[in-house]
Image (cartoon, rainbow, N blue to C red):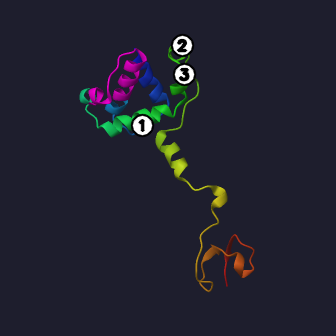
Amino acid sequence: MTALRLLQRMKRDWMHTGRRPSGLCGAALLVAARMHDFRRTVKEVISVVKVCESTLRKRLTEFEDTPTSQLTIDEFMKIDLEEECDPPSYTAGQRNLPRASSWEGPRTTHRGSQLWHGCPGCGQGGGFTLCP
């Protein structure tokens, strides 16, 4: 029952979208086994669910980034968290985006070209201007 509950929580946290179910099942089985003091290795689980070791480790890492992974065993069994997480692909994309404060707009090297660009050196004050 614990593995099923873990899978339900993974589904609410959008971990299932765009993924094959065997990776999630393997992660849920491994976590559930360890929650109940059955020491299973990653190799034992991947031999059953037939996924690559890196796939299983990625699913475990994604689960680790959710609030559910911070609960104790008793809390996990009793509490049903209301909040949902963003999909892992979305959060990974957010981490890879540059900071908005560090982006200064597209740049060009030719002052005479008729391109829209941020050019504080031409007297236009920066931002997107047409440099004469």
What residue is shown with label 3? 71
Q: Of the two numbered discs 2 and 3 on the same chain, state the one appearing first in sequence.
A: 3
Over which residues does the magenta segment extend?
Answer: 25-46
Q: Nearer the viewer, mark 3 or mark 1?
A: 3
Q: Amino acid at mark 3?
A: Leu
Magenta part, dominant SS: helix
Q: Mark 1, residues whose alpha carbon is within 10 Å: few (<14), some, or many (≥20)? A: few
Residue 126 x/y as whole percent: 71, 72
Instruction: Answer yes or no: is residue 76 visible.
Output: yes
Horizontal placement of 39 versus 62: left or right? left
Instruction: Judge whether residue 33 is colored magenta.
Output: yes
Q: Nearer the viewer, mark 2 or mark 1?
A: 2
Distance from disc 3 to disc 1, alpha carbons, whole Å, reads 23 Å
Instruction: Answer yes or no: is residue 15 visible.
Output: no
Q: Of the two numbered discs 3 and 1 on the same chain, state the one appearing first in sequence.
A: 1
Residue 120: image quadrant is: bottom right
What residue is shown with label 2? 78
Q: Residue at coordinates 25% horizontally, 26% vertically from top-left? A: 48
What residue is shown with label 1? 17
Distance from disc 2 to disc 1, alpha carbons, whole Å, reads 26 Å
Q: Amino acid at mark 1?
A: Thr
Residue 106: image quadrant is: bottom right
Q: Amino acid at mark 2?
A: Lys
Q: Residue at coordinates 34% horizontally, 38% vertically from top-left? A: 55
* Circles 2, 3 touching at the beta carbon (< 8 Å): no
Q: Nearer the viewer, mark 2 or mark 3?
A: 3
